[in-house]
Amino acid sequence: MNSLKSKISYLRGLADGLDLEDTKEKKLMIEIINVIGEIAMAVEELEISAEETEEYLESIDEDLGKLEEDFYENEEGYDDDYEYDDFDDFDEDDFDLDDEDFIETECPHCHETVYIDIDLLDDDGKTECPNCNETINIEFEEETE
């Protein structure tokens, strides 16, 4: 920025050194140099503002990083108390899917076998497929004695 200010000062010196009488051309030249000076000041203010904004963003980024570290207790983003940090070790046998609270059904949209918790059904027996997010209509068979 200093080089721009020095160039404007140099232009002012050249204009003064021309020894032009108070003509329209001299007035025009001086006004053009003044406008260029104002533009240079505006650019300097923008540079200062950009630097301050960059520092502020870096500060926010550091704070966000600290919050992420606190929120996600480990690198994978899973809570250490969670039983299955590595989903390759997931075993369906650890869960009792034959429990009466679950319904096994095939999704009519993605054709995957899904287990639906009865508590997740709405009043019409509808719920959302956990695989494709399409609506599944569960029809209960009436038990006859």
Image (spheres, rainbow, N blue to C red):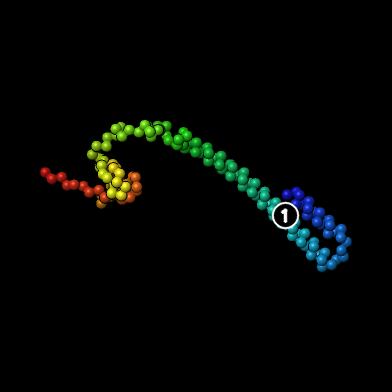
Residue toward you, 97 or 38:
97
Q: Quadrant of residue 104 in the image?
A: top left
> Which of the pair 86/123 is nearer the observer?
86
Instruction: Give the percent coordinates (x, y) of residue 130.
Output: 33, 45
Q: Give the residue at the far front of this rendering.
A: 111
Q: Is residue 91 above or below residue 128?
A: above
Q: Is residue 143 left or right of residue 70?
A: left
Residue sitting at the far bottom = 24
Amino acid type at image mark 1? Ala
Q: Residue 12 sits in which quadrant?
A: bottom right
Check the image and name the residue furthest to the left.
145
**Residue 57 shows in this picture:** yes
- The image shows residue 30, relative to residue 129, as above or below, that is below
Does residue 100 appear to the left or right of 27 in the view shown?
left
Residue 56 pos. (x, y %): 60, 44
Residue matched to label 1: 40
User: Where does residue 29 sit, x and y in percent of width and height?
Assistant: 80, 62
Which residue is at a point 73% across and 49% down the rendered structure image? 1
The answer to whether residue 118 is visible is no
Residue 38 place in picture, x, y as percent: 73, 57
Q: Is residue 104 left or right of residue 74?
A: left
- Asked if residue 106 lies left or right of residue 35, the reply is left
Which residue appears at 56% of the width and 42% of the height?
A: 61
Dot 1 crowding, Cα within 10 Å, few <14, some 14–19, many 20+: some
